[in-house]
């Protein structure tokens, strides 16, 4: 299930970049890509919940990872919506970068993930 989770967030990141670039160009398919990205938000949450459910206990850092992961999804959505409305997104981009780095670090550092940092 870990591979499915990683695949969903990689695809979501690609869709996020595509949606941002479509919005910048005023492309007609922006709304479709945004809706597809929202579907991947749900898939990310579902696969993450499945991984968490398969564990025998819920260590504190996994709960922190869930919260930071939801923060990443929230900032992605807010960036897209505020960009479409023509509002400033500088603070949201900073939040996105910080949260994304933290969630990647936790995902790779914790024992249930891959051992890049061990």
Image: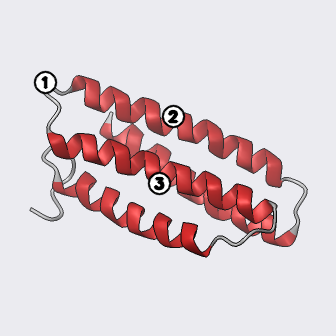
Q: Residue 48 at x, y = what percent?
A: 37, 35
Q: Quadrant of the C terminus?
A: bottom left
Kindly identify which residue carries mark 3.
72
Task: Give above or below for 85 relative to 55.
Answer: below
The residue sitting at 62% across, 36% down in the picture is 39
Crowdedness of circle 3 by 10 Å Cα count: few (<14), some, many (20+)? many
Q: Quadrant of residue 93?
A: bottom right
The residue sitting at 40% across, 38% down in the picture is 4
Residue 101 appears anywhere in the view: yes
Residue 15 appears anywhere in the view: no
The residue sitting at 12% across, 46% down in the picture is 111
Q: In the image, 17: left or right of 51?
A: right
Task: Give above or below for 50 relative to 60.
Answer: above
Q: Quadrant of residue 27?
A: bottom right
> Marks 3 and 1, Cα distance to the nearest angstrom?
26 Å
Camera-nearest residue between 53 and 60: 60
Crowdedness of circle 1 by 10 Å Cα count: few (<14), some, many (20+)? few
Kindly identify which residue carries mark 1.
56
Q: Residue 44 at x, y = what percent?
A: 47, 39
């Amino acid at each position: 299930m870990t591979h499915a989770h990683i695949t969903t967030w990689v695809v979501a990141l690609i869709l996020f970049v595509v949606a941002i670039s479509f919005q910048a160009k005023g492309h007609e398919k922006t709304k479709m890509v945004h809706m597809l990205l929202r579907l991947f938000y749900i898939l990310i949450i579902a696969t993450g919940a499945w991984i968490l459910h398969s564990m025998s206990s819920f260590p504190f850092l996994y709960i922190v990872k869930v919260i930071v992961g939801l923060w990443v999804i929230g900032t992605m959505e807010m960036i897209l919506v505020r960009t479409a409305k023509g509002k400033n997104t500088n603070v949201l981009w900073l939040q996105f970068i910080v949260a994304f780095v933290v969630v990647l670090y936790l995902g790779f550092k914790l024992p249930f993930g891959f051992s890049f940092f061990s």
